Image (cartoon, rainbow, N blue to C red):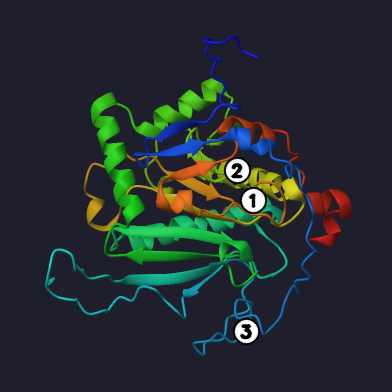
Amino acid sequence: MEPAGVAAAFQPSEHQHIRYNPLRDDWVLVSAHRMKRPWQGQVEKPSEENIPRHNLTNPLCPGALRAGGEINPDYEGTFLFENDFPALQPDAPDPGPSEHPLLQAKSARGVCQVMCFHPWSDVTLPLMSSLEVRAVIDKWAEIMKDLGASYPWVQIFENKGAMMGCSNPHPHCQIWASNFLPNEAQIEDRTQRAYLREHGIPMLVEYGRLEEERKERLVLANKHWLVLVPYWAVWPFQTLLLPRRHVTRLQDLTNEERDSLASIMKRLLCKYDNMFEISFPYSMGWHGAPTGCHLSEDCSHWQLHAHYFPPLLRSATVRKFMVGYEMLAQAQRDLTAEQAAERLRNIPEEHYKLRDQGPSSVK
């Protein structure tokens, strides 16, 4: 016990504090001492999902009938199609002038697509081969280039698992292209532009180098990429995927960088799955420099990156909900970024399904 009048030395893992997120210009409350609550370490495992490899009642499978009346081709690799229930459409009418500054509306036009990663419903990215993951990356880059020729923002994102709102287990992602910059894109554009202006180096280029030097939040690294738990992480095992080279858009990656990306993605996602020996849920997405009318602008303040937001903290079934204080005040987390990174570093990279059952059980 500390003598009266003597302040205890600050320890991030013991004392609550707030951390600044320069990418979003906001703060997160870190309360790692809460992990000492009695139910820490609960690791119950849900029953294994029995997902058929191919089922014609599944609208994402090859040969299946979709809600819009289209029949999928018998695809063998990736497959891209227009979303049958799009949130954005290219020909929506303009709402016209706003009646009042408190009642503003503007046009929202765009396209929504779905991209299947693989023809089999019972595989996920970490269980696919490196060549198959590389094909996904190449298709992402192609989509970014094609839609980015006319739309200012192209958001590639994957919601994995029912816990993250995914209604279909088939391996897939979505692409929403819009005629406006969404809120997160506007914030990241503003903060990265301001950082470059003030410090003379792109924010995430400097941040990646800083984390590589310190290593305490670094999870994985290879020749071209870094995976780290950001200092300002909100989700329990949130990670940030960064290229070592300064590159602003996904389509600008070299062949070698794409190969390295396929490798490090598989390694990260195997670690996620191995944490609780389940198909680990998450939402992820790519952020890069705006496109469309912004292609002719100087976007050197941007650094390409991917966010991974997994919700699980203590077990395979108990998720971290952003409610109460998080919704009404600010984000809060129960373990430090350093603790999360250490745990991820120590998780094996060989997928538990391959380790326990052998590769023939999956492919």
Residue at disc 3, secondary structure: loop
Residue 64 got which mark?
A: 3
Q: Which of the two discs, 2 and 3, sits closer to the camera? A: 2
Q: Which of the two discs, 3 and 1, sits closer to the camera? A: 1
Question: Which image quadrant for residue 88?
Answer: bottom left
Left/right of residue 258 with respect to residue 163 in the rendered view: left
Which quadrant of the rendered structure holds the C terminus? Answer: bottom right
Q: Position of residue 240 (x, y in %)?
A: 51, 41
The span from disc 2 to disc 3 (Cα, nearest Å) is 36 Å
Q: Residue at x 32, y 70 (%)?
A: 110
Residue type of the residue flagged with mark 1: Leu
Residue at disc 2, secondary structure: loop
Residue type of the residue flagged with mark 2: Phe
The span from disc 3 to disc 1 (Cα, nearest Å) is 33 Å
Residue 237 got which mark?
A: 2
Disc 1 + disc 2, Cβ < 8 Å = yes
Residue type of the residue flagged with mark 3: Ala
- Of mark 3 and mark 1, the one earlier in the sequence is 3
- Of mark 2 and mark 3, the one earlier in the sequence is 3
Q: Position of residue 284 (x, y in %)?
A: 52, 53
Task: Give the residue at mark 1.
Answer: 312
The span from disc 1 to disc 2 (Cα, nearest Å) is 8 Å
Question: Few, some or many C-alpha atoms within 10 Å of disc 2 (few <14, some 14-19, many ≥20)?
Answer: many
Between 27 and 4, the residue placed more toward the observer is: 4
Q: Residue at x 36, y 32 (%)?
A: 203
Asked if 85 appears above or below 195 in the picture, the reply is below
Disc 2 + disc 3, Cβ < 8 Å = no
- Of mark 1 and mark 2, the one earlier in the sequence is 2
Between 303 and 134, the residue placed more toward the observer is: 303
Counting every numbered tag in the picture gives: 3
Question: Few, some or many C-alpha atoms within 10 Å of disc 3 (few <14, some 14-19, many ≥20)?
Answer: some
